[in-house]
Amino acid sequence: MKNFIKTATLGTKNFFIRLWNKIKRRFEHNPNKIKESKLDFTLSIVNVVCLLLGVLIVIFPLLNYFSYAFNNGYYNIDVVFFPARPTLDAIIYVMGGEMAAEFWRSFFNSVIITATVTILSNLVEALAAYPLSKFDCPFRGGIMMYFIITMLFSAGVIPIYVLMDSLSLTETIWSVVLVSISNVSNLLYFKTFFEGLPEDIEEAAKLDGANDLQMFFRIVVPMSLPVIGSCCFFTIVGMWNSYGGAMLFISTNRDAYPLALYIYTLVTESGMIRGDAWVEANVKNIQSAGMLISIIPILCIYPYVIRYIKSGLTIGSVKS
């Protein structure tokens, strides 16, 4: 925990230092700098203002809602952006009170779903993208067209549900896992990245007697950490926050609820929260505490994968 706080603090500090340096360079006088037209300068100011407004529109509602997680429910009317009467009672109630068993069960369901989909999805996509990145791959164009068509057209919800029901996977977490493994967008990211890898290294590995699988896992994968880290992180965030698939396939078995669906139900169905006078007065605080706790795992992962995401965001931007 100390290492996480230290990493997050250092990353935040470096971000603001870089931002401040960019602002100073933007307005300081430099005789060698190409003079910017008034129209360009005005557009830059408008862009900055629009971005700041966008940040405020996103941050203030979240700050207002999460402040309820640390507030005493009897004083909710005084909450704006910070707790009026700070307390951890709502968070303790969610993690260790009457709701704890159901909360932690849904939490571990989400861990299983997210970990399984992340590993299987990115492994399958990377293995499929590697041969497709080679221009001598047989039927390369037709196979790529097949994958792209699946991005544009879908059979619909009913056939998928009928398939899961025929496999007796409804009301289980495995229905969510199976329908989430395929992600053609990540396959295209992998393919684009693999196309930019130097062919000399692979040719040298072939001369040393490496077969295709050895070359992929021992040569290609270590050189592809940026795209792997980016795709894995996007998959983790998408699966951790997704409740649509679970809502479709899991309707009656609350033991199979992932955390996102549990939080959705917690927020939309206030009747889930019943108890004494304190519980009735802290319904909104308990809902906010559940939402706050649900985003902590993503916040803990982000500082360790940010360097891979920065590299992965430039995939395909430069071609030799």
Image (cartoon, rainbow, N blue to C red):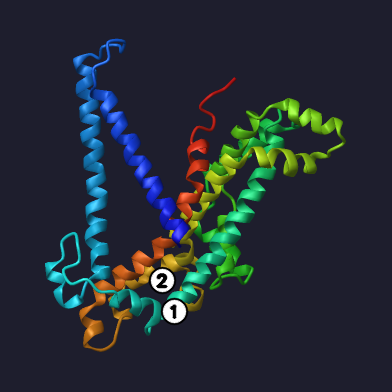
Q: Amino acid at mark 2?
A: Tyr
Residue 281 in sight: yes
- Give the mark nearest the N terminus, 2 or 1: 1
Q: Amino acid at mark 1?
A: Glu
Vertical comparison of 122 with 272: above or below = above
Helix, strand or loop at label 2? It is helix
- Locate the C terminus by quadrant: top right
Across and down, in percent, residue 94 comes to 36, 77
Q: Say which residue appears at 33% left-offset and 38% top-offset.
A: 17
**How many C-alpha atoms fall within 10 Å of the one at disc 1: few (<14), some, or many (≥20)?**
some
**How many C-alpha atoms fall within 10 Å of the one at disc 2: few (<14), some, or many (≥20)?**
many
Front-most of 19 and 122? 19
Spatial CA distance of label 2 from label 1 is 9 Å
For this orientation, the residue located farthest to the bottom is: 276
Please give left or right for residue 111 compared with residue 280 in the image. right
Mark 2 vs mark 1: give the one in front.
1
Q: How many marks?
A: 2
Mark 2–mark 1 contact, CB under 8 Å? yes
Q: Say which residue appears at 48% left-offset and 38% top-offset.
A: 310
- Image quadrant of residue 95? bottom left
The residue that label 1 is drawn on is: 102
- Image quadrant of residue 221? top right
Please give left or right for residue 252 compared with residue 282 in the image. right
Q: Which mark is residue 276?
A: none
Q: Say which residue appears at 62% left-offset and 55% top-offset.
A: 119
Across and down, in percent, residue 306 comes to 47, 45
Across and down, in percent, residue 220 comes to 70, 38
Q: Say which residue appears at 61% left-offset and 39% top-offset.
A: 190
The residue that label 2 is drawn on is: 262
